[in-house]
Amino acid sequence: MLAGVSTASLYPLETEKAVSTLGELGVRNIELFVNDTSELDGDVKKQIKLYTTEKKMNVISVHPFSSPLETHFLFSDYPRRVKTITDIYRQYFVFARDVGAKLFVLHGAYREARCTDETCVERYLMLSDIAADYGITIAQENVHYCRSGSLDFLRYMQRECGGRAKFVLDIKQAVRAGYDPKEVVKALGSDIIHIHVSDNKQGADCLPVGKGTYDIAGLVSELNGVGFDGALLIELYRRNYGEYTELTDSVNRLENIISLYGQG
């Protein structure tokens, strides 16, 4: 298991500056949250590649800012929109491949979207096939305001995809949907390949590790039990912590937990 940080935790700092900031802090495992399509190529990508190579940073995954569009494009009944977003996401897959990432995070359709669950599975598999051509795995995140916020839906995906569905477990999103994240691990098992980590307590559901009361050690132990060997990356909102050093403190605490309860 690896510990690290998502650049989303530094938003609205520009993506390449977020990367360099994390590098200077000594963070070596990151998720890149792309904040604009202009960042997928040109100078921004060059800066990111140069810096991550220089600092020996491991880009685990890529998260698109365009997740809210997925309902109206990828899961639309209008074919032109489906083609539009798949063309855009091909650019993300090229970017992910070029910076060394292997995972792409998908939110999926909003809970109230008109598309059927069958369409959600069909489009997930379609996008997974496209991503595979670039060496990228699509990982469905549990998002409380999306169809994926339901554990029943995630189980449905797992069953209907015939072993091809892979998942991102986001602790805060599980809590917001009314689940203990350990319950999600028990349900989805080894198909969980990536974790977004935050601590929580009564009245605050997105905190640095150690600032809440959630049983992260128990979660890591549960993950260890299903053979999880991926990355646990800190993902906070900028308003939920003060100094950037709170991110590295979180990583250090998480690494200690992994050394005791996981496969470090």
Image (tube, grey):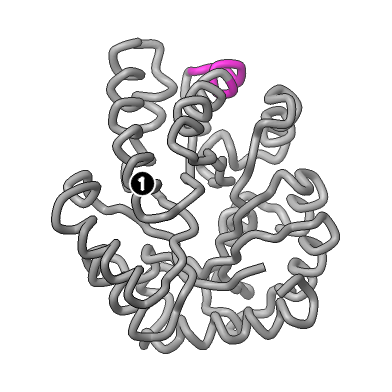
Q: Is residue 12 visible?
A: no
Residue at figure coordinates x 15%, y 51% from the top left: 42
Q: Which residues are magenta?
A: 115-121
Q: Viewer-proximal residue, 50 or 121?
A: 50
Count of labels in the image: 1
> How many residues crowd mark 1 within 10 Å: few (<14), some (14–19), many (20+)?
some
Q: Which residue is most to the left?
A: 43
The percent coordinates of residue 40 (x first, y second) are 24, 47
- Type of amino acid at the residue the image marks with label 1: Pro
Q: Give the main secondary structure, helix, strand or loop, of the magenta stretch.
A: helix
The percent coordinates of residue 251 (x first, y second) are 55, 80
Answer whether residue 60 is magenta in the image.
Answer: no
The percent coordinates of residue 97 (x first, y second) are 39, 46
Left or right: 176, with 109 as reference point = right
Answer whether residue 119 is magenta in the image.
Answer: yes
Left or right: 176, with 123 as reference point = right
The percent coordinates of residue 258 (x first, y second) are 71, 77
- Vertical side of 152 occupied by 173: above or below: below
Q: Viewer-proximal residue, 82 or 154?
A: 82
Left or right: 40, with 237 as reference point = left
Quadrant of the image containing the C terminus: bottom right
Q: Is residue 218 visible?
A: yes
- Vertical side of 173 occupied by 219: above or below: below
Instruction: From the image, tell me which residue sits under label 1.
Output: 64
Residue at figure coordinates x 54%, y 40% from the top left: 137
- Vertical side of 34 occupied by 90: above or below: above
Secondary structure at badge 1 equals strand
Left or right: 67, with 137 as reference point = left
Residue at figure coordinates x 34%, y 10% from the top left: 79
Quadrant of the image containing the N terminus: bottom right
